[in-house]
Amino acid sequence: MLGPVDWFIWVLSLLFEASVIVCSLRRKSFRRYFLLNLYMLISVLISAGTFRLLLHYGRKSLEYRYFYFYSEALLIIVLYFALIGLYSRVFEEMRVERYVRLGAVLLLAGTACFTYAVVSQSSHRMLTYFVFELCQNLYFVGLVLTYVLWGAMLKLKETRALLVQIVLSLGVYFSAYAASYAISNLRPDLYSYTYRLFPIIGCLLPLAWAYAIWRVPEDARLAPARLAVVPR
Amino acid sequence: MMASLIFVFSAAALLQFFISYCRSLIAASSKQVLSAEVKDVTGIQRIASGDDFRRVMQLLRLCPDRPEDRNSVQAIGAYFSLLNLLRSTVARIVPSTRAWTESERGHCAYFAAVALERRISFSREMLAQQMDA
């Protein structure tokens, strides 16, 4: 079973995810950031499902493990589309939404094919390893896409403070996850420590989004060039 | 090899996103003018210095916590520690970095002073509500 610290982080994470939806509803921005809210809604539902499985079967059960990995894959795919939704918002004036969507679907299919090609050569438990590898690869693809989006925002001089904070917090989330996964691959002996990082990182994204939606008005503006690490 | 590359890229991106995120939090507060009262308490008149940060944070901890700004205050605290690390390592080798870290540390102190101002108003509101009740 989970220890008290695990439970605390889990409850905290659930509260933060729910608070994003509540803040969006109160700020009347639920539809504007529909995919982000959909991701949070699914996260809340999955957390409730995880809780039920933990109570009935325990942490070491196969049911819990399968549910964990498959729900993780579902979440990362929804988050991937939420990121594409942010692309659409940044490029909305250029009217290139159709191409962005098409590119996103092709990239997702390409990542899945690449993962399949890697897994099919080295594993006999195909589907489980496929899901695990797909999650890792999508975190990295998400990181690269967020990095490209942030670069485009700097180039296009995007000034919407709320959008800037949402994209930057997503960047922190993706890069922290990708780095943790990479450490797990580099040093499998450290996995018993690194797996503890995942729920903590998972708390940061809803916390940052709830803060941004609640505190930053939709019409707030800032100069993005001031935020770049390398002065422009 | 691939995992090492992913790790290096992710760690570099994490650092860059974290710094930009902290600067976006600071940018939002930099336009806010401090009240005379907070200026007196913190000793910050117009431009804050990095040396003010610890003192302002101590004052901040004396005020009742506001759940809305806890996350941002902690993020800026971590950013300040990162700047201190840069100041004591990289800035000694690359002098141009020193001016940048000093200016950023000052912005962190100003951010903490703005958070202090918000917490003081929050405490007053709570006290007023209690008095009314």
Image: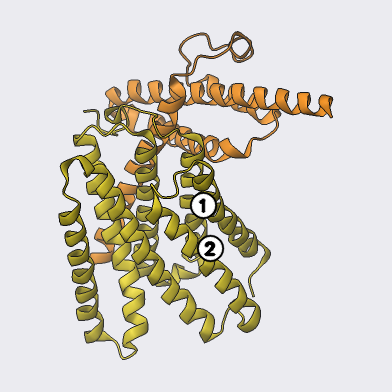
Which residue is at the front of the view, A175 or A80?
A80
Question: Horizontally, is B16 left or right of A96 in the view?
Answer: right
Q: Secondary structure at mark 2?
A: helix
The chain letter of the yellow chain reads A
Q: Residue at x 47, y 45 (%)?
A: A208
Q: Residue at x 58, y 69 (%)?
A: A48
Q: Quadrant of residue B44?
A: top right
At which x and y percent is residue B11? 33, 51
Name the kind of residue labelled 1 in the image: Ile
CA gap, disc 1 and disc 2: 10 Å
Q: Residue at x 36, y 58 (%)?
A: A179
Question: Horizontally, is A149 left or right of A199 in the view?
Answer: left
Question: Horizontally, is A214 left or right of A95 in the view?
Answer: right
**Contact, mark 1 vs mark 2 (Cβ under 8 Å):** yes
Residue where numbered disc 2 is placed: A44
At which x and y percent is residue A185? 35, 69
Which label's residue is closer to the chain start, 1 or 2? 1
Is residue A226 shown above or below A197?
Answer: above
Q: Residue at x 29, y 23 (%)?
A: B95
Look at the image and tell me in which quarter the N terminus of chain A lies: bottom right
Residue where numbered disc 1 is placed: A21
Are discs 1 and 2 both within one chain? yes
At which x and y percent is residue B101? 37, 26
Name the kind of residue labelled 2 in the image: Val
Is residue A207 something one can see in this rendering?
A: no
Mark 1 falls within which chain?
A
The chain letter of the orange chain reads B
Question: Horizontally, is A103 left or right of A31 in the view?
Answer: left
Q: Residue furthest bottom?
A: A124
Q: Quadrant of residue B87?
A: top left
Mark 2 falls within which chain?
A
